[in-house]
Image (cartoon, rainbow, N blue to C red):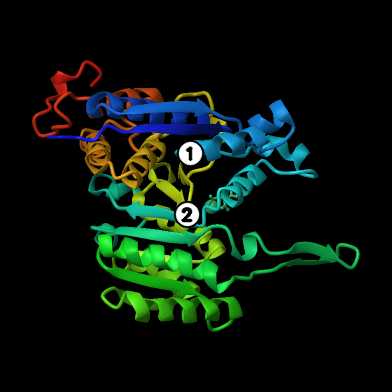
Amino acid sequence: MTLTKKELHIAVLPGDGIGPEVMDQAVKVLQGISDSFGHTFHFETCLIGVDAIEKTGHPLPAATIERCKAADAVLMGSIGDPQYKKYADKFRPEDGMLGLRKELKLFANLRPIKAYERLHHLSPLKNKRIKGVDLMIIRELTGGIYFGDHGRKENDSFAYDICSYYQEEIERVAHLAFKEARKRRNKVSLVDKANILESSRLWRETVTNIHKASYQDVELDYLYVDNAAMQLITNPIRFDVLLTSNIFGDILSDEGSVIAGSLGLLPSASIGETYCLFEPVHGSYPESAGKDIANPMGAILSTAMLLEYFDMHAEAKSVYDAVDYCMVKSILTNDLEPDVDYTCSQLGDVIQALVAEEEGINLKGLKESNSSII
Ligand code: IPM
Ligand code: MN
């Protein structure tokens, strides 16, 4: 097999809470990949969130933006700590994340949700409903109500948040969604509130026009967000690519996490024209920070999305295979498997060892006794 050797500069932003621990595992896994496939990955750690506020006075220091722009990709842990409310008057740690999305123009957020058979029992949903679910939420990430005008008037007794979209903002994420659907099961569901909101009506018009002009081979349907919220848990199998606005995507992706059984499992990719960022969907979970009990799967699966983005499909597959192997063999953290109880760093070691197998990963042939860690 001839492989092109790649060299990538990756900015690592561990952030707050369990962010640093899960990022350590993600980096280990990428090192395992570079060992077995002969690539060179350079990692540079940068500050963001509470950590950055404490050290520099700002949640998104200029040096971090600069390094992220200079890198090929960004890997991020998580941001936020409720203890740090004292900074809220000036800025919140979360402003670091929103600022970075805007600075890097990461207009599309891809959040895949998969039901792992081995973990069906963890979902509060009936197994027959989640069996075989494999969907992708594509959330617009730099527009809408998150970035519209916010404010107070009339002695603070009136508050407003404006939701607005330009046609071009909808077009670019819609193109991405149709192209993604072609790699999957060829279906896009547009989720909006077009019966009420003018911005949603622009979404419908725009997506319909793009579909007609360029993607008639892809099936397109439309759902109001209230109905979509219900169908996501009553009939999730109906979804392939779910395309939606910033705030609806935020809400639906947390809802969708119950399908997978744990928020700790979900990865994401945020993509723009020039830059890309990969991060687990979960938050900073400060109560568990430093205890080595966090689930690193979301962060590790985010590295697989990074590898896919750079067309390293065999490499990504070896990460997915290693994760599947851990599922099947119950090599899991406490949140998924109370009886087994692997630590966050042990799980990182196992997956690093699996992906670093010299011949590439060969799960069928791999016996438990072959690995000193397992
Ligand atoms: C997410 C988070 C963020 C969001 C917060 C932390 C700003 O909930 O990535 O889903 O609302 O986008
Ligand atoms: Mn969210």
Q: Residue furthest left?
A: 365
Circle on res. 273? 2
Q: Residue 342's quadrant in the figure? A: top left
| One can see residue 260 in this view | yes
Q: Is residue 229 above or below residue 39?
A: below
| One can see residue 61 in this view | no
Q: Residue 15's quadrant in the figure? A: top right
The spot of residue 257 in percent (x, y) is 41, 53
Q: Is residue 292 left or right of residue 62?
A: left
Q: How dense is the environment of label 1, judged by Cα within 10 Å: few (below 14), some, or many (20 and up)?
A: many
Q: CA distance from mark 1 to mark 2?
A: 14 Å
Tell me, yes or no, whether the two marked residues, 1 and 2, touch with CB atoms within 8 Å.
no
Circle on res. 74? 1
Identify the amino acid type marked 1: Val
User: Residue placed at 34% from the left, 23% from the top?
Assistant: 346
Disc 1 secondary structure class: strand
In this view, the residue in front, 141 or 364, is 141
